[in-house]
Amino acid sequence: VQPSSKRVFTDREFAAAGATITRDLSGANTIMGVKQPLNGSLLPGKNYLFFSHVIKAQPENMPLLDEVLEKKVRLIDYECIREGGGGTTPRLVAFGEFAGMSGMVNGLRGLGLRLLSLGHSTPFLSIGPTHAYTDYSTDARRALRAAGEQVARAGLPAEYSPLVVCVAGTGNVSRGALDALDSLGEVVERVAPSELARLSALAGTAGEHQHKVYVCVTGAQDFV
């Protein structure tokens, strides 16, 4: 295991569990990670498992794919590990609900910072970054609930209302994001995609919609 100060589990805990802590991975045949490594860091002839984000020909990751080919690396992309080995069957390795929870907490905080830069102080500024909370189910949810109560009481700026958060899909990450949004409390109102036109007509106006956070879940049928 390579040393890192960014993981939830410390190097000491990995060592206590029997892992060897070293930066040098040259002695390993198979190297497992989560996200793609830095360009230029792949070891020739090794087996790698990680989310590479290359199967859709994402332009920003083509240099990584070139390096894989040049160094004769065997790449096992988690995104391609599917039930029965099919190309369209359900994925067996995917991000979990915590990714959605974390992303939404940081997203709401980012929204607060963005609105502040535009001259508006909103309740979302009271939400801290995800890594600042020791426990999501208590600390983060408490902060989200408090922010929701402030929205219900004080409202959001008219020129940026109504606030609509669209969550795409119904997978693990989406469920996590919805869990975080629902933690805002009674201020959240679910709406169907067919209702978005009605809400759009209220843009920039004052009203009860300033005291709501509208949440819309969309599926593939809504994009085709």
Image: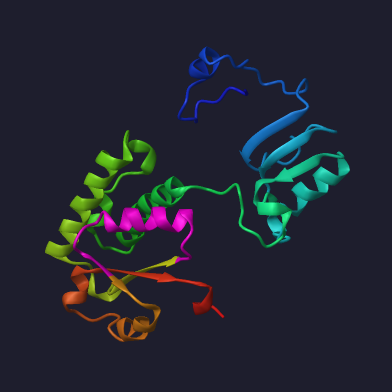
Looking at the image, residue 66 sits to the left or right of residue 33; the answer is right
- Residue 113 in view, yes or no: no
- Residue at position x 77%, y 23% in the image: 26
Q: Farthest residue toward the left?
A: 153
Residue placed most toward the observer, 154 or 80: 80
Q: Quadrant of the N terminus?
A: top right
Looking at the image, residue 59 sits to the left or right of residue 19; the answer is: right
Residue 99 percent coordinates (x, y): 46, 48
> What segment is highlighted magenta in the picture?
168-189
Q: Nearer the viewer, residue 221 or 92?
A: 92
Name above or below for residue 48 compared with residue 224: above
Whether 170 is drawn above or below 67: the answer is: below
Q: Residue at x 81, y 44 (%)?
A: 67
Q: Specify whether residue 80 is painted magenta.
A: no
Where is residue 149? Give x, y as percent: 16, 57
Is 74 on the left or on the right of 14, as rendered? right
Image point (87%, 40%), residue name:
72
Of residue 181 and residue 158, the one placed in the foreground of this image is 181
Residue 127 at what x, y percent from top left? 28, 48
> Measured from the top left, where is residue 120 in percent x and y?
26, 63
Would you place residue 161 above or below residue 122 in this image?
below
The image quadrant of residue 133 is top left
Task: Please identify the quarter of the rendering in which residue 87 is found.
Answer: bottom right
Q: Is residue 32 above or below residue 192?
A: above
Quadrant of the image occupied by residue 49: top right
